[in-house]
Amino acid sequence: MLAASLSAPLWPGLLQAQSVNLLQFPRDLGSHPDHAIEWWYLTGQLYAGSRVFGFQLTFFRSRVPTTQTMTSSFAAKQLIFAHAAITDVTRKRLWQTQRIARVSGNRQLDLAFASTQDTEVQLGDWSLKHHAATYQAHASGADFSMQLSLHETQALLLQGAQGWSRKGPDPAQASYYYTLPQLNANGELQLKGQTFQVQGNAWLDHEWSQSLLPSDAVGWDWIGINLQDGSALTAFRLRSQTGHAIWAGGSFRAKGQTLTDILGPNDVRFTPIRHWISPASHATYPVVWAVDLTRPNTSGQPGTTRYIVQAMVDNQELDSSQSTGAFYWEGLSELLDDQGHLVGHGYLEMTGYVSPLKF
């Protein structure tokens, strides 16, 4: 499923000018400990009869520059953070938890591990592992747990220029970034001792970088949506303190296509429609957005498409102050077309609304 994704269009001269490496698989499914930051981000929508759930499991890796030359087995060369959350849409309830552990390189001592050969990330008994086009995910908190199998149904999608995704006006502000959309998900959720057999669909992002955000960016607004017709939509903007877009981008891949429409900074516009105020952080988040995309229409000419993204539960704010140190909003959302018809589901993420995001 990986080879077909290599046909993504290339921005002329960009990779050569920046000495950017083309991604190679399965190697680049694994960790990149020479890069400053990295994450594997898994989200989706699940069903158990009439019950509807959203889920999120993210593993973050952060390189610690000051310890790289230390020889002690106790030196934290890397830190692994992990966040897990379940949204019970039916009951309007959010469950969340977080973890953090060091990586010294000594597996007998470390509680965390990230393979450089393939996706295999572990923090205690939490894990995300890839084998033969299937991912296994496990996480648990005080009152909930998830054990999920996620099966690839489409080719891997390279974001940006063959996996090099610009995040600002400076070409160095970028990340390596690929997506596996339209994953077929099934498994088990447990909430307060009640077990649900679930199935649905999911989305996996893997991203790593040395320098990601422009200095004047306080955070971002991002969506990753599995459309009902099998298409996949990514859109994001980096936001200044005044709320203006510093940079924007994304991608759209229609079902059955190997080529991806790459969206640049002039092709994506986010406009807030309705806000929600968090009782915990007192931040004000837009929980309904209009997202306008400029991309080729059926005749190959540029045209603008408007979507509405709306949260399925307003209160999906995550408190990660005990790990990454930030509050942010991340939750299951619906995608509507400009006629108000439901066309997809996915996750909306909004950072930097409580305080500027720092890596």
Image: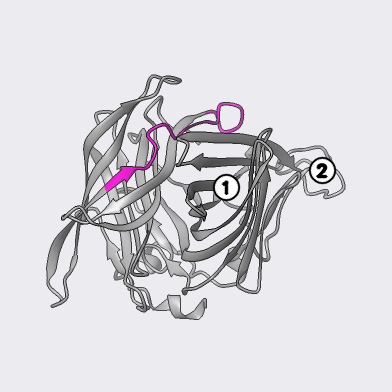
Residue beneath label 1, please? 57
Residue beneath label 2, please? 71
Identity, as a three-letter code, of the amino acid under mark 2: Thr
Q: Secondary structure at mark 1?
A: strand
Mark 2 neighbour class, 10 Å CA radius: few under 14, some 14 to 19, many 20 or more: few
Q: Secondary structure at mark 2?
A: loop
Q: Say left or right for 333 vs 303.
A: right
In depth, the one of 341 and 71 nearer the eye is 341
Q: Say left or right for 68 vs 264.
A: right
Q: Residue furthest right?
A: 108
Q: Per the image, is 312 magenta?
A: yes
Identity, as a three-letter code, of the amino acid under mark 1: Leu
Residue 277 in sight here: yes
Residue 139 in the image: above or below residue 251: above
Residue 266 in the image: above or below residue 67: below
Q: Position of residue 239 (x, y in %)?
A: 30, 38
Q: How many marks?
A: 2
Q: Position of residue 303 (x, y in %)?
A: 13, 64
First along the sequence among labels 2 and 1: 1
Mark 1 neighbour class, 10 Å CA radius: few under 14, some 14 to 19, many 20 or more: many
Q: Residue at x 40, y 29 (%)?
A: 356
